[in-house]
Amino acid sequence: MKAAPSLLSCNFAKMGEEVQRVDRAGADWIHLDVMDGHFVPNLTIGPAIISAVRPYTNLPFDVHLMIDDPLDYIDAFADAGADIITFHVESKSDTEKTIEKIKSRGVKPGLVIKPKTPAEVVYEYLDQVYVIVVMTVEPGFGGQSFMADMLPKVTAIKEECARRGLEVLVEVDGGISEKNACFAAAAGVDVCVSGTGIFKAKDAAAAISAIKKGI
Ligand code: DX5
Ligand code: ZN
C-alpha cells in the first residue's frame, strides 16, 4: 500500500520541515486536509498554506476538501500545486461538474464518502475518477478511532472496479496506524492516510514502512 501522511497532525509552525521529514521517512503522497467550518465543524488550511509548503517536496499533494462548495475552489487548489483533489459526494457541488473541473486543470480527481454513505453512491462515477476515499472516521478531526466496519465498502468498490475492468485506487482515511494497517491491506486498500499514526510516532520511518507492508 501507499502511505499518505496527513499534515493535520504535524507541527504547524514547521510545516516545510515536517513535509521533508516524512518525505525522507518514505511517504508516497502528502495528504492535506482542507476544512471550512461548515461541511465539518473545524477550520484548517487553505490554498495559501498549500502553495507555501509545495516547494519542500516533489511528492504528490493529495488535497482532501471537506468544504461545502468544492467546485468554487478547484482553481485555487490547482494553482496552489495539488496533484490530486478529492471532494465529498455529500458536498453541495454537482459531482460530475466538479470532477470535470478538476480534470480540466490537469489534476487527478477523487470522491470521498463519509461513514454513513454507502459504497454504491460512487459506482456511477467510477469510470471518471482516479481514486475513491472511504472515510474510516467522521471527517473533521485527526486522532479519532479507526472504524473497521468501513472496510467492507473498500472491498465492494474494488470488486465493482474489477468487474467493470476499471483501475481506480481506493484510499482509507482516519485512525490508521501500523496497528491496524493489516486490516486495510486485507480489504484491498491501495492508499492509507495516517496523521497521528505517522507524525506522532516515535519513528516515522518505521511507522510508514509498517503501514506500507500492511502487516
Ligand atoms: C479527518 C481527516 C483525516 C485525519 C487523519 O477529517 O480527513 O485525514 O486527519 O488523521 P488521523 O490519522 O490522526 O486520523
Ligand atoms: Zn483527510
Image (cartoon, grey):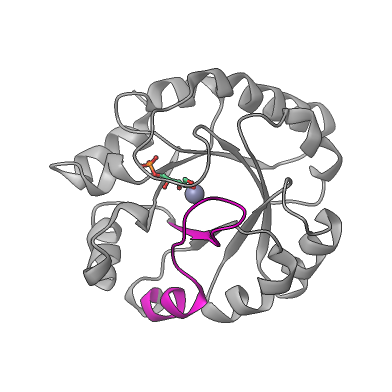
What percent of the width, then of the height, locates residue 172?
52, 37
Residue at 44% across / 20% down in the picture? 183
Residue at 60% across / 57% down in the picture? 38
Q: Would residue 138 appear left or right of 125 to someone viewing this image?
A: left
Residue at 20% across / 39% down in the picture? 206
State the image quarter where residue 134 is shown.
Answer: top right
Q: Quadrant of the C terminus?
A: top left
Which residue sits furthest left?
202
State the image quarter where residue 143 is shown.
Answer: top left
State the image quarter where residue 181 is shown.
Answer: top left
User: Splitting the image into four quadrants, where does ligand 1 fall?
Assistant: top left
Magenta residues (range): 31-53
- Say which of 140 and 3 sits in front: 140
Residue at 41% across / 76% down in the picture? 49
Q: Would residue 115 appear left or right of 25 to someone viewing this image?
A: right
What percent of the width, then of the height, locates residue 123?
81, 36
What percent of the width, then of the height, locates residue 43?
46, 61
Where 50 falls versus 157 (above or below)?
A: below
Q: Quadrant of the N terminus?
A: top left
Where 105 falls versus 119 (above or below)?
A: below
What percent of the width, then of the height, locates residue 164?
84, 32
Where 195 falls versus 12 (above or below)?
A: above
Where 136 falls versus 29 (above or below)?
A: above
Would residue 199 be counted in the magenta stretch? no
